[in-house]
Image (cartoon, coloured by chain):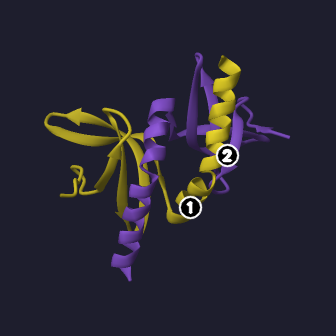
Chain colours: A yellow, B purple
């Protein structure tokens, strides 16, 4: 049932029509990749627009979700 | 007390020595930017290695954290 992209990476979710989160295995390291794709004929290919996080970086991102959420909310409040 | 990068974006956290999460305001839209920087003299500048998520994309990422966590854990278990 799992979806793989055309490079063989496991697709976790789509963030938008063109942006996806995938799990890449690169030389034995698992990377969480947040990346934009483009259609090349019938094939969807990754662009350079994106970033692949190693486990430590992903873990740091995860720990900081509340801080990021707060900053987004503060920005929204300021916009009102 | 808040830290801003040399482009004036609010720095939320560092994921590694060179990678940061910042909040950008681009033409009125708040973007969560996950990006690599480089040192240009005394100034830290963003590289193209990264992605800036709008609020909907960020919200989608946030909702999918458990699925991403599960996939990372499954990968780790498979590596053992």
Query: Which residue is most to the bottom?
Result: B80
Name the residue at 44% across, 35% down. B57
| Front in this rendered view, residue A68 or B9 | A68
Query: Which residue is most to the left?
Result: A42
Circle 1: element type = helix
Q: Position of residue A6 (x, y in %)?
A: 21, 49
- What number is the disc on residue B10? none
Image position of A28 (left or right of A9): right
What chain does mark 2 sit on? A
Q: Position of residue A78 (x, y in %)?
A: 70, 22
- Asked if labels 2 and 1 share a chain, the reply is yes
Q: Do we see residue B26 in this rendering?
A: yes
Q: Earlier in the sequence, mark 2 or mark 1?
A: 1
Q: Do we see residue A28 in this rendering?
A: no
Q: Position of residue A50 (x, y in %)?
A: 44, 42
Compared to residue B52, the image places residue A12 above or below, namely below
Name the residue at 48% across, 45% down. B62
Please identify, in this view, whether the residue under mark 2 or under mark 1 is nearer the observer.
2
What chain does mark 1 sit on? A
Quadrant assignment for the C terminus of chain A = top right
Name the quadrant containing residue B27: top right
Name the quadrant containing residue A30: bottom left
Quadrant assignment for the N terminus of chain A = bottom left
Circle 2: element type = helix
Distance between mark 2 and mark 1 Cα atoms: 14 Å
Q: Position of residue B61 (x, y in %)?
A: 45, 44
Name the residue at 62% across, 54% down. B15
The residue tagged 2 is A67
Query: Badge 2 local density, few (<14 within 10 Å), some, or many (20+)?
Result: some
Image position of A31 (left or right of B15): left
The residue tagged 1 is A59
């Amino acid at each position: 049932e799992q979806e793989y992209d055309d490079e063989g990476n496991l697709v976790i979710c789509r963030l938008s029509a063109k942006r996806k989160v995938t799990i890449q295995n690169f030389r034995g390291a698992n990377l969480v990749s947040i990346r934009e794709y483009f259609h090349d004929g019938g094939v969807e290919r990754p662009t350079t627009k994106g970033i692949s996080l190693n486990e430590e970086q992903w873990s740091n991102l995860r720990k900081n979700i509340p801080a990021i959420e707060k900053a987004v909310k503060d920005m929204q409040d300021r916009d009102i």
